[in-house]
Image (cartoon, rainbow, N blue to C red):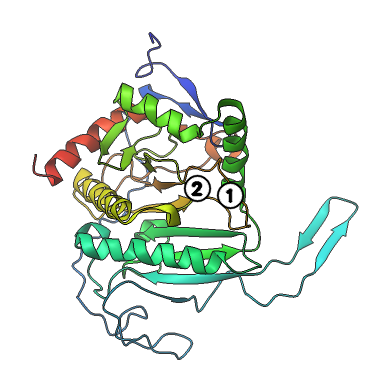
Amino acid sequence: MNFPLAEQPHRRYNPLTDSWVLVSPHRNKRPWQGQEEKDDTAKRPIYDETCYLCPGNKRSNGEFNPNYESAYSFVNDFSALKPSVEKITFEKEGLLRAESEGGICKVVCFSPRHDLSIPDMEASEVRAVVDLWVKEYQALGSLDHIEYVQIFENKGAVMGCSNPHPHGQIWASSFVPDEPLKKQANQLLYLKKHQKTLLFDYLLTEIQEKVRMVFENDDFVVLVPFWAVWPFETMIVPKRPMANIAMMSHKERDSFAHAYKQLTMAYDQLFEVSFPYSAGIHQAPTDGFLHEEWHWHMVFLPPLLRSATVKKFMVGYEMLANPQRDITPEQAAERLRVCVSKVSGL
């Protein structure tokens, strides 16, 4: 391919969402005089008596956390969705529409220690988080009124995280949200046409080209997707097509935990800061169907652009027209590969 992707403005297509991203590599050289974030590197204590997520502490609803020693989950005290909701619909002239929605929101504490995050935890501790995700996916997904289980993590104040204690969330809803719904539709079209999952074929291409690969282990590939929007956006994708995380073998769970920890360690190495991001797992709905079109994956969307203090803003053109990025996915992957080599001791 003779297309000068590293030099010329161009658009890239995302087959998962049937959308485009504008790439402008020449803009990465422009001077920066905009907002810079606070580099918050303050050391946190192992235990914080004021933290509502630490073991044994009182939460806002008056309940006390148990003295948990591993990954622990509970129903969110300020849930965005509630389980007991009367079914109400509203419509006026076909333009004003609303309907009530129920669901369950849970908090997942990754560790009892207040001072850790995923890259700081032992491999066995990260595996415990994976096991709890699987357990919650199965338990919540088995409920009749739940059709989708969204597992996600917001890390860092710049991502709106309200508590630095290592944790994530699970929102189980009675509907399939827009982003996974788009991915489902496009994966289904691809499966019907090619009799293979979209991401299986995509992985073959990425493994062959290597330029966007960050690293791989026996069961998973970590890469910067060709269509990445955020500067150092990545995906963890299983090599074996699986509709959901409950289909992983015990070995694959270990491999997934390893990939999760290794990637986040590389992120922390990139700008020598505890790297903020939003991350989440996209997988099949829990509506009782097999969903052979689904090839589950975990997406990481970090905001940092040039340093620990300069972030990418989604404003102006991005909000009104089309996502846009400056650094190319190939350049981002190359920098992350260097970081993986450092944290792996290679």
Q: Please provide percent x and percent y for residue 325.
A: 42, 32
Disc 2 packing (10 Å; few <14; some 14–19; many ≥20): many
The residue under label 1 is which amino acid type?
Answer: Leu
- The residue drawn where x is 19% and y is 76% is 46
- Residue in front for this viewpoint, 345 or 200: 200
In the image, residue 31 sits, relative to residue 61, either above or below, namely above
Measure the C-alpha gap from mark 1 to mark 2: 8 Å
SS for tag 1? loop
The residue under label 2 is which amino acid type?
Answer: Ala
In the image, residue 280 sits, relative to residue 332, either above or below, namely below
Identify the image quadrant of residue 155. Answer: bottom left
Residue 227 in view here: no
- Residue in front for this viewpoint, 227 or 197: 197
Q: Please provide percent x and percent y for residue 10.
A: 47, 20
**Residues at marks 1 and 2 touching, judged by CB atoms closer than 8 Å:** yes
- Residue in front for this viewpoint, 244 or 105: 244
In the image, residue 15 sits, relative to residue 219, either above or below, namely above
Identify the image quadrant of residue 286. Answer: bottom right
SS for tag 2? loop
Give the position of the N terminus as an image quadrant.
Answer: top left
Q: Please provide percent x and percent y for residue 48.
A: 26, 80
Q: Residue furthest top?
A: 2
Residue at numbered disc 2:
243
- The residue drawn where x is 58% and y is 46% is 291
Residue 155 in view here: yes
- The residue drawn where x is 26% and y is 43% is 307
Residue at numbered disc 1:
290
- The residue drawn where x is 23% and y is 34% is 335
